[in-house]
Amino acid sequence: MPIYEYECNKCQTVMGFLVLNPSEELTLKCKDCGGDDLKRIVSRFAYHRSESDRLAEFDTSKRQGDEFYKDSRNVGLWAKKRANQLGADLGPEFEEVIEKGRTGKILDDYDL
Ligand SMILES: [Zn+2]
């Protein structure tokens, strides 16, 4: 569904609109103050992606570059994705291990 988010330049209210046709953008009115000076917020999703979004996009069959693993949030993502694909319920202990892997604490536990 092409739902876009807009911010009203008058009152700064952020609202979502279902926009099927780009020309409809011109007729959009602020739900709050009725103003027609709205700007589309495009980068919002890129900055506020949830873990489930990243999981959905993560392809375990592709090799990830070093850049991928430089983002500590992506550590453990592979394991989670695989687990999801296998339908495994790994429970809170697994989450804990992943979390340790992310923070580097896992090395302490294994006395390396
Ligand atoms: Zn407004």
Image (cartoon, rainbow, N blue to C red):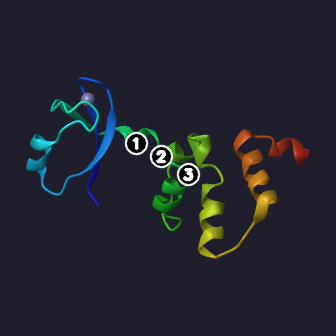
The label shown at residue 49 is 2
Q: Nearer the viewer, residue 109 or 99?
A: 99
**For the residue marked with disc 3, what is the amino acid?**
Glu
Q: Nearer the viewer, residue 74 or 89?
A: 89
**For the residue marked with disc 2, what is the amino acid?**
Arg
* Disc 3: which residue: 51
Under circle 1, the secondary element is: helix
* Disc 1: which residue: 46
Residue at (18%, 38%) from the top-left corner?
A: 29
State the separation of the CA atoms marked 3 and 1: 12 Å
Q: If the picture is divided into quarters, which one holds ligand 1?
A: top left
State the separation of the CA atoms marked 2 and 3: 7 Å
Q: Position of residue 78 (x, y in %)?
A: 60, 60
**Could you classify mark 3 by the number of other residues whose Cα lies within 10 Å: few (under 14), some (14-19), or many (20 or more)?**
few
Tell me the quarter of the picture where residue 41 sits.
top left
Residue 45 vertical position relative to residue 11 in the rendered view, above or below: below
Q: Position of residue 85 (x, y in %)?
A: 59, 73
**Could you classify mark 1 by the number of other residues whose Cα lies within 10 Å: few (under 14), some (14-19), or many (20 or more)?**
few
Residue at (83%, 44%) from the top-left corner?
A: 107
State the separation of the CA atoms marked 2 and 1: 6 Å
Q: Is residue 43 visible?
A: yes
Residue 69 vertical position relative to residue 39 in the rendered view, above or below: below
30 left or right, relative to 104: left
Q: Position of residue 28 (x, y in %)?
A: 16, 42
